[in-house]
Image (tube, rainbow, N blue to C red):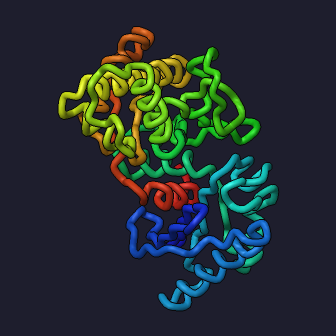
Amino acid sequence: MKEYAFGIDLGGTTAKAGLFTTAGALLEKWEIPTDTSDKGVRILPNLAAAILDKMKEQGLTAEQIEGVGIGVPGPVQESSVVPIVCANLGGWGQQDVAANLSLLLGGINVMVGNDANVAALGEIWMGAAKGCRSAVMVTLGTGVGGGVIVDGKVIDGAHGAGGEIGHITVNPKETAVCGCGKHGCLEQYSSATGVVRCMKKLLDENPDVPCVLRGANFAAKDVFDAARSGDALAAREVDEMTDVLGLALATIAATADPEVFLVGGGVSRAGEVLFKPLAEHYKTYAFRSCRETPIKQASLGNDAGIYGAVRLIVGA
């Protein structure tokens, strides 16, 4: 195996990039602006130019590069093809990303994965699940993402939708519409956006119950902080949120039976006020054999995607 590899985590505003040894040491990381104009026609050329510039800067040749891994915010098939348009990339997508980027890089090997799946791969390689062969990661941010790793391999599915944990239906009676067009998705309850939505609903439904958040412009962090401080209505929202998330994890466990669940994203920084009730609710719903599966906070933070992208290249 060659000595170096690049990992890229492509986002709607910037792409995070990292130069690694193929043993997994992060040597340097930087960001590349994501140009989403004209349906993202310049995204791949800009990424290629940034990698080639970094190689020149470091005195590296193509013969020293094992490859480039890239995580993208959309479904991926066969570690290469993005089959649908990525809405938050200005309509970019529906192309063989691996082949096109490789061509721009002069033939350097490229592999592609869904960004959430790739982040999970990073955590199982060098993060909180290091040493495990199977793990499920749930990212709680503006939405809810996920990644499923079985025997060291990403389960991306026949349509590239493996790991779309945020769109598991947890309440078929929900009338509000999820961003995906369905109703009652996990994302509507357990994302940062969902926590705020549900907290506002609780406040409206309980006008006579005192709450420190009433009348305030609050974020998900404020809900968890209020619950931690003993606010009863905020604590009720956290309990309901973790109940729904625990149900979803128990459902996943009955299918994938991972060694560990990892929770990442901004909401995961709430700490014990999130993880303690989540573990309790999970055990309530989980199949007997899976009840003791640990639920841990992911450890690589925003670097999980670039680590996982490199893992696509260096293999399991």
| 26 and 201: which is toward the camera | 201
The x, y position of residue 294, in whole percent, is: 33, 28
Q: Is residue 39 left or right of residue 304?
A: right
Residue drawn at the location 72% of the way across and 62% of the way down = 90
The x, y position of residue 301, in whole percent, is: 38, 54
Q: Is residue 242 left or right of residue 120?
A: left
The x, y position of residue 114, in whole percent, is: 62, 49
223 is higher (above) or lower (below) than 40 = above
Residue drawn at the location 58% of the way across and 87% of the way down = 53
Residue that protrudes farthest toward the left in the picture: 229
119 is higher (above) or lower (below) than 31 = above
Residue drawn at the location 41% of the way across and 32% of the way down = 261
| 74 and 254: which is toward the camera | 74
| 76 and 88: which is toward the camera | 88
The x, y position of residue 38, in whole percent, is: 79, 71
Query: In this orientation, does residue 1 appear?
Result: no
Query: How many circles with numbers are drawn on the protein?
Result: 0
| 277 and 163: which is toward the camera | 277
